[in-house]
Structures are given as C-alpha cells and as structure tokens.
Image (cartoon, rainbow, N blue to C red):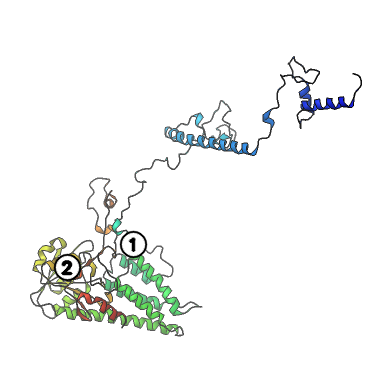
Amino acid sequence: MGSETPNGSVAASAEASSEVPQGAGPEKKQRRTTAPEGNTSSATGNGSKDSSVKPPDPGNEKPSGAELKKRAKAEKAAKRAQAKQEQQIAPQNVSKGTTPETDKIQYGKGPVTQPSQSSSSKVQHKRAGSSSANAQKPLQLRPSHQQIPTSPLESKKEVKKVALFSHLYGHPRRTTILGAGKDVHPSVLALGLQMSNYVICGSNARCVSTLLVFKRVISAYSTPTGTSLPRHLTIHLSAQIDYLVSCRPLAISLGNAIRWLKLVISHIDPDTPESKAKSELCSAIDNFIRERLTVAGQAIAASASSKIQDGDVILTFAKSSIVERTLVEAYRQGKKFRVIIIDSAPLFEGQNLARALANLGLQVQYAPTHTLSHVVQDATRVFLGAHAMMSNGRLYSRIGTAMVAMMAKHSDIPVIVLCESIKFTDKAALDSIAINEIAPAEELGTLSAPATKEERPGQWRDAPNFQPLNLMYDVTPEEYIHMVITEYGSLPPSSVPVVHRLSTYT
C-alpha cells in the first residue's frame, strides 16, 4: 500500500486523464473534482463521478459555418416577414392619424421616434423595451408607392391613338422654336412655324418657300476649316430639314426638290471658290423654281383652260393653286362658265378660293361636302388638284377628294387632275393607311358651350373610349380619273411612272 510502483502511477494518471476532457484548463479540472455548492453528494475515492455533476455547456462551443449560415437565413426571413406585416398595418394607422406602440418600425436595433419636447436639445432614441413617463409618439410610416391612393386626375390617361394608323403617329407637331438646334437659320425657324400653322399650306407654296429660304441659308453659309463645301453644306442643310420635318412632314414635291438640291451640291468641284459655288447654287434654285413650278403651272393652265367651254359648270374640291390659275385663265379668255366649290373641315381651304374667284367676277357656288350628291348633278367637268401622283396611277390629295371623284364617276362626269411632274413619285399606294399624315386632333374643333362644369371646352378629346383621327389625305383609284394634265401634256394615269422617269433623269 505504502510503496508506489511504476504501474500504479501510470494507472493513476490514466484515471485522472479520463475524468478531465481534452483541452480543459485548470478551472475545468477543479470543477470536475469539486462538488457544486449546495450539493451533499461527493466524489468517491475510486475516481468515479457523481451523477449530479453538470455536463459541458454546448453554448460555449463555437458553431460551425453551416449553422451560422442557417441562423442568418432564419433571421433574414424573420425580418422580411416583420417588415411585410408592418407595411400592411402602417397604412391603416396613417389613415387614422394614430400609430399604436406595437407598430413602431425598428431601423437597426430600435424604433425611430420624434425628437423630445423637453428642454434637452439632444435627440433621444429609446429602445422598444424602455419605459418612461414621457413616452413620445413615434414617427408615422409613409405608405409604399403601391399603397398611395391615386386621384382620377393622376391615373394613367387613355392612349388616344387609332391602332390601325399607329405607324403614322410620330413626335407631336412643333408649334414653337423652343428646343431648335443652334445651326437652324432664323428664316427656317419662321418658315417652320408658318407651315405648322397653315399660313403656308399648299404643296407648291411650301416647296417654293423652302427653296427661297434655302437660298438665304446658302448665302449666309461659310465653310469651316478642314472641310469642303460639297461635304459640309449637305450636313448643314440636313439640320434645317430636320427642323422643318418636326413642324410638318415634307410634301412629295418638296422631297423631290431637296433631293435635287443635294445632288447639285454633290457635283460641285471642291476646288471651286466658296463665293462662286454659292452663287451657282442660288442661280440653280431660281432656275428650278422657274422651270419646274412657274412655267410648268402656266403650261398646265393653258392646256386645262382649253377643256372649258361656254356654259360649263366646273366642280372642284377645296383649293388648288393650279386649278385656280386654270379658272382665272379661262375667265380671261372670255369664256362664260360657273364654278362649284366643295369644301370640308377642318381647314376650309375652299373659302379662300371662293373669295378670290368671286372678287374676280366669276359665278361661284360654295357648298359643304354633305351636299355633294345634289350639286354634282349640275356639274359638267371636275377639276382636281393633287398633292402627289403615285406610280400606280392613283391620286394622293386632300382628304375628301376620293369621295368627289367617286360621285363624279357615278354621274358620268369626267374627272381631270391637274398636276406638275415635280409631284410625281415612284411610291405606290393602294389605300390611305400606309402613307398619310395625321394632323393634331385639336384642329377638328372645340365645343361651343360646356354641358356641365366638368365638361369645359376642349375636354371632349379626353372623353373615355373616344379616339379622334384627323387624316390629311386620301387616295383616289385610277379608274375614277379620266385624264391627268401635266406640263408634258395630257396623259392617262397609267403613264405617270413614264413621265416621272423623264422628269427625273433629263
């Protein structure tokens, strides 16, 4: 008993090591051998442990990465559910003007409360668990964007566009010079507004006015250093053209004239002095206006006036400058005839023609379109102007022209179209849908007197399920047209592409 053997020491040490877990310090060893306070049981001398000794605390052990990730995901889901519940409760409290204490929104660890009304100037942030006699009212939660009630005025407006003509809707027509480019000439700015407001309306008038304004642009132009006039002048004119297009789409005749002008500019020798090149361009523009518009109009008027006989009743639609010139020429030749002018909204161009012919001394009858079926019976010939002649022989003119031609054809009255070759195009149109121009709906008119206080003048355009459509042109089939008179002579509609090639490449 009193002697210690090497085997006994080894056994004692093994027994002690089995009682103490690995990695435990001196405190844990003492905790294992010492009975807890208040416990009457003690360890036996043979090294066995008492059953009342507590096992190691698992909370002190470091969690693994998977457990941390799982714990973070659970916390995030709890926060998301709490935020969703608060968003559902907050709008009700906001509408009532009160927010219960249980609905405080916590940002971070504590709720956001209003600044204290006490003498202290510091802003105090109280935790949700704190209790105070001077409890402050928390800030009300602003409802989310989807929960804000919208008034009828703020609701989404109905799209006032006809789906069949959706490809024709572009940018709204420009009515001011705001936003115009710095390179746009002042004369071009004024011309664009005149076209937009129908001060300059006819296709011939728009073409001549634009070419004359381009003469001013060319005269004021100076070639920048490092470039040549043929290259840069075309770019400079493109800025002017873009502005005019934003005011109103280009007429067919104007588009042909612009292509001709760019072709002439491209043929200028870069070595030509700038002053000489600009002088040649201005002279070329004057010759183009004289040959393709002025002289061509005189030739058409002389040829068409020969078709008018004494006692004829000439019916026309709206206002055409070449038709007016033809009627004036026939009157000056001493022929006795009468004129019927059919007109329609919204431009009522026929009023200007009726006033001009009446002041000259002709007998003029002015009638709206709904009387066409009656007045067409008195007509002997129908003279129509043109905005363009398509390559398939169809007439593209002011809307209502096709109805007049159809009624005349039904009554066996010859329909004669007066058109310069500058208005011929290689485009083909089968209807008025693919190619057309949509004018602003405001031009259709306004209400004269409101029925109620809510129905003020002009609000009829915003009426529900109402889509105004203000088309500018229509297409007349070639079977309704008896003859087309140009500066090249009289020809059938099927010969339009032949004349177009002759006038373009000669």
Residue 363: % across, % down: 11, 71
Residue 309: % across, % down: 10, 78
Residue identified by numbered label 2: 405
Choose the circle earlier in sequence order: 1 or 2. 1
Q: What's the distance in space between the residues labelled 1 and 2, CA to CA?
A: 30 Å
Between marks 1 and 2 in the image, the one whose residue lies nearer the viewer:
2
Q: Please identify the quarter of the rendering in which residue 281 is found.
A: bottom left
Nearest the eye: 48 or 382: 48
Q: Marks 1 and 2: CB-CB under 8 Å?
A: no
Compared to 71, does 379 lie above or below? below
Nearest the eye: 430 or 246: 430
Compared to 435, does 278 lie above or below? below
Which residue reaches farthest front?
Answer: 7
Give the total of numbered labels.
2
Residue 362: % across, % down: 12, 73
Compared to 26, does 222 lie above or below? below
Q: Is residue 365 visible?
A: no
Apparent side of residue 477 relative to residue 104 in the rendered image (left or right): left
Compared to 206, does 108 lie above or below? above
**Mark 2 surroundings: few (<14), some (14-19) or many (≥20) residues within 10 A:** many
Which residue reaches farthest top?
Answer: 40
Quadrant containing the N terminus is top right
Nearest the eye: 14 or 283: 14
Residue identified by numbered label 1: 173
Give, as a three-letter code, the residue at label 1: Arg
Q: Identify the element where label 1 is drawn.
A: loop
Quadrant containing the C terminus is bottom left
Q: Please identify the quarter of the rendering in which residue 189 is found.
A: bottom left
Which residue reaches farthest left?
Answer: 311
Q: Please identify the quarter of the rendering in which residue 146 is found.
A: top left
